Structures are given as C-alpha cells and as structure tokens.
C-alpha cells in the first residue's frame, strides 16, 4: 500500500461507523430506505445505468454501501472496493438488513487483485469525490480499464475541478490555482459535521486535485472511448458547477 493510502485509511477509519449511523440511521433504518425506493437512493446516477439484473458492478471507493445496496436490491452483483473496515461493517450490516448480498474488498484500489478481478466487471462505477485520493490518475484509470470486460462501461462521477478555485460545495477545503499539481493535506469529507474538539483530532487525508483536461486525457490514454461528459450544478449554488460525470466504454 502506498504511503498516502495508509494515511487516508487512518482518516477513513476514525469514527466512520458511528458517523454513518448518525447521518443515515441504523443499518436496518438505512436498509428500509434502500428497499422502499432503490432508484431514488441512486439519485441522478440511475440515468446512466442501462440495466441492473445480473450485471456485475465494481463500486470504487464505495464507502458505506450507499449506492451498492440499492444496486443489489435492483438485482445487480456488486463488489465494493474501499479502504475502510468501518465502511465495510456498516455496508454489510445494511445489506444483511435488506436481505441482499454485496461483496466488499477492503484494499487500496491501486492494489486490487487483478488475477481475481481483471476483466470481471460489466460496469465500473464511482461517485462522490474519489479521484482526489489518488496521486497518479493515469495509473488509477488504467486499473479501471483492466477491471472491465471488453464492451464494459465506466461511470465516473466526481467533484468538479472548479472546486480547485472555489469551495463551491462548501466542503471546507483550501482553494488553489486551477492548474496546481500540489499534493496537500486536508480534512476528510465528513470532518465538518463534527464538533471542533473532535474535528481537530481527526487524521488528515492526502489529496491531489485534477483539471478537466487531466481527467479526460487519463480516461482516453488508458484505452477508454469517451461517450459523454456531463456537468452538474453545485448543491449550494446552482449557478456554479459542483460535479461532473464521464461515461466511457472499453
């Protein structure tokens, strides 16, 4: 595991299980929401999925299973790859309460077992701020390509690079030059929900933020064919870009 991944793992295993319970409810409460409206729980991402039944999904940095479980409810075969044992615990308890099965591999995404998972998936899917945890986006996209079957599809939805120059999503992270290649330490995603005393004790993550061209070129250079690139407004200010989604085929 690369050094910065060890640092990020410490951050994502600090009070994470308790945080998900406080935000999303107990596993049984969360499972009820997933069962009642799985499409709704997928939010805008459902528009990018062609089908679910028996489709093999790799959910990259799938966190607490907030998208993996609804996908499984809809009939998908889902494997979550994530660095946090705490996330795994919550995700599997939600899946059990929903009476569905998901697989969950706790690992550095850069070290996924390709003998087991190479060319295995129909869809690689990620959302909610993933790319900035990886300092070599070309290597990351190469792994995404390798996970897919021929004809498979990657759906990468992430924070818009505009966030480099404006905290458009109110995440409390520092801004910088749009073209900066700086690696920096910053608070983990949900630190802002804690009181200052706890927040000050939380381990930091190591980030590298990318430009639009760096992201698209990494997708292309890894062998993908880009099918579409969508931009979505910030949830705090609809006049500013907040997220994007790139869809690409192998």
Image (cartoon, helix red, strand yellow):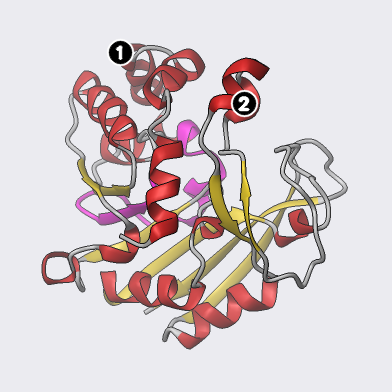
The quadrant in which residue 116 appears is: bottom left
**Mark 2, secondary structure of its residue:** helix
The quadrant in which residue 35 appears is: top left
Q: Which residue is under mark 2?
A: 200
Give the number of callouts. Answer: 2
Nearer to me, 190 or 223: 190
Nearer to me, 9 or 100: 9
Q: Quadrant of the C terminus?
A: bottom left
Nearer to me, 227 or 212: 212
The quadrant in which residue 101 appears is: top left
Q: Could you tell whether 12 is left or right of 206 in the image?
A: left
**Mark 1, secondary structure of its residue:** helix
Q: In which quarter of the image is the N terminus?
A: bottom left
Q: What stretch is highlighted in magenta?
A: 40-62
| Picture layout, residue 117 above or below residue 64 | below
- Mark 1 or mark 2: which is in front? 2
Q: Which residue is drawn at 47% across and 32% down?
A: 41
Mark 1 Cα within 10 Å, few/some/many (few <14, many 20+)? some
Q: Which residue is drawn at 46% across and 38% down?
A: 11
Residue 73 magenta:
no
Q: Could you tell whether 162 is left or right of 107 in the image?
A: right
Q: Could you tell whether 169 is left or right of 68 in the image?
A: right
Q: Which residue is under mark 1?
A: 28
Provide residue 29's location: percent of width, then percent of height: 37, 12
Q: Residue at x 28, y 35 (%)?
A: 85
Mark drawn on residue 189: none
């Amino acid at each position: 595991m690369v050094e910065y991944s060890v640092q990020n793992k410490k951050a994502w295993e600090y009070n994470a299980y308790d945080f998900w319970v406080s935000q999303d409810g107990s596993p049984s409460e969360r499972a009820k929401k997933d069962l009642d409206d799985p499409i709704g729980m997928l939010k805008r991402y459902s528009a990018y999925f062609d089908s679910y039944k028996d489709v093999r999904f790799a959910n990259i940095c799938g966190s607490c299973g907030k998208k993996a479980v609804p996908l499984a409810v809809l009939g998908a075969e889902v494997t979550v790859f994530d660095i946090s044992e705490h996330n795994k615990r919550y995700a599997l308890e939600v899946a059990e309460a929903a009476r569905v099965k998901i697989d969950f591999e706790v690992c550095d995404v850069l070290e996924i077992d390709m003998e087991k998972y190479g060319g295995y998936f129909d869809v690689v899917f990620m959302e909610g701020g993933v790319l900035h945890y990886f300092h070599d986006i070309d290597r990351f996209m190469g792994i995404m390509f390798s996970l897919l079957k021929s004809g498979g599809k990657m759906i990468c939805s992430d924070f818009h690079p505009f966030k480099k120059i404006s905290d458009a999503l109110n995440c409390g992270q520092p801004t910088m030059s749009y073209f900066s290649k700086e690696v920096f330490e910053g608070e983990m995603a949900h630190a802002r929900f804690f009181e200052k005393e706890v927040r000050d004790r939380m381990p930091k993550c190591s980030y590298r933020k990318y430009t639009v061209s760096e992201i698209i070129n990494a997708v292309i250079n890894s062998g993908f064919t880009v099918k579409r690139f969508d931009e979505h407004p910030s949830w705090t200010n609809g006049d500013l870009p907040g997220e994007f989604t790139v869809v690409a085929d192998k």
